[in-house]
Amino acid sequence: MEKGKGIDRVKEATEKIIDMFRTGNIPSAVARTVIARDKSEKPSNYWSLGNQLLMMIAGTFDARGFNQWKGVGRQVKKGAKASYILAPMKKTVKVKDENDPAKEDAITIIKGFKGIPVFRYEDTEGNEINRPSYEPAVLPPLIEVAERYGVTVKYGPFTKNFYGYFQPATKTIMLCTHDVRTFFHELAHAAHNTINPLKGGQHAVQEIVAETCAAVLCEIYGYEGYIYHGYEYIKHYSMDKTNSGIIKEIFRVMNDVQEVLRLILGQPSENKNEENVA
Ligand SMILES: [Zn+2]
């Protein structure tokens, strides 16, 4: 992108987004998509939802116990740290039958949970196993920006309401959808983190910055069908749900939005005397 022209394009797209949100005149939305789980016999396919989420937080889509890895010809690398999933500890107890006090029924109760150590695929070596590919046929625009920031992008199957996240500590973006908007959103978090270290969890200001950036990038790259989702997302995090309230919240974080977009698109800052990161 040519320097001057690029800045104009960002400005133009940002103004267009603000105008769409203000008037409610937003292009019709395309359906969101998610990545389907593969049919392979990965042990984690049978885990509880909570354990699958713990695995993803650990930054992998395939975690197994030490012996499970051994069973498929892979060894845990020296020094690798285990993550823990939770297994219920069951106990069988006998209770008297309500209708017939002479009879006893055996029932199983959960008396607690214990942590089971598992290791990430990334922390093992050995025989190549059949790994399903979850990557899109064509990687999204700006994927090279993630690389520039040393951010790893991983795609994996969808697990209930979980579309993606960026983890600052490991510099990893995990995506459970091929929707470009979600990648743009997490990329914006990653870039934002370099100027304003992110707070944990879903912080309203951070979410509004990331999603506004994603909406502008969707406009620039021609994915206008996602802009409505962006509007809904920002509305969700906005204290005031009216259109003018939403615009106010966006303007409150506009400096960060512009800074993040400049970082992502590799343009020089207007405010600071810093080097172009491109
Ligand atoms: Zn977010």
Image (cartoon, helix red, strand yellow):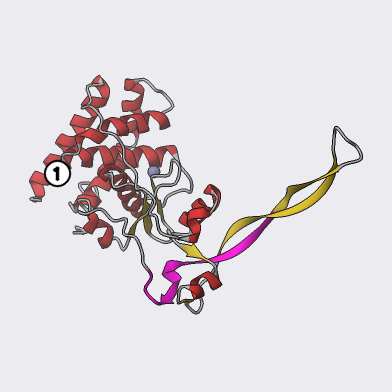
Which residue corresponds to mark 1? 7
Q: What SS does tag 1 mark?
A: helix
Q: Determine the residue positioned at 31% across, 32% down.
A: 229
In the rendered view of the protein, which quadrant contains the C terminus?
Answer: bottom left
Q: Determine the residue positioned at 19% across, 51% down.
A: 141
Amino acid type for the residue under numbered disc 1? Ile
**Residue 163's image quarter?**
top left
Left/right of residue 11 with respect to residue 209 in the rendered view? left
Query: Is 251 part of what is drawn in magenta?
Result: no
Left/right of residue 84 with respect to residue 147 in the rendered view? right
Of 28 and 65, which appears nearest the observer? 65
Q: Is residue 52 above or below residue 32?
A: below
Range covered by the magenta-colored residues:
113-129
Q: Determine the residue positioned at 38% across, 50% down.
A: 196
Q: Position of residue 176 (x, y in %)?
A: 36, 49
Q: Position of residue 105 (x, y in %)?
A: 81, 44
Of 146 and 269, which appears nearest the observer? 146
Mark 1 residue crowding within 10 angstroms, few (<14) / some (14–19) / many (20+): many
**Ligand 1 is located in which of the four quadrants?**
top left
**Residue 223's image quarter?**
top left
Instruction: Give the tally of numbered discs.
Output: 1
Q: Determine the residue positioned at 50% across, 75% down.
A: 70
Tell me if the residue at label 1 has its CB under 8 Å from ligand 1: no
Left/right of residue 275 with respect to residue 189 in the rendered view? left
Q: Which secondary structure dominates the residues rendered in magenta?
A: strand
Q: Position of residue 111 (x, y in %)?
A: 74, 51
Q: Position of residue 240 (x, y in %)?
A: 41, 23
Question: Please, which residue is most extreme toward the right here?
Answer: 102
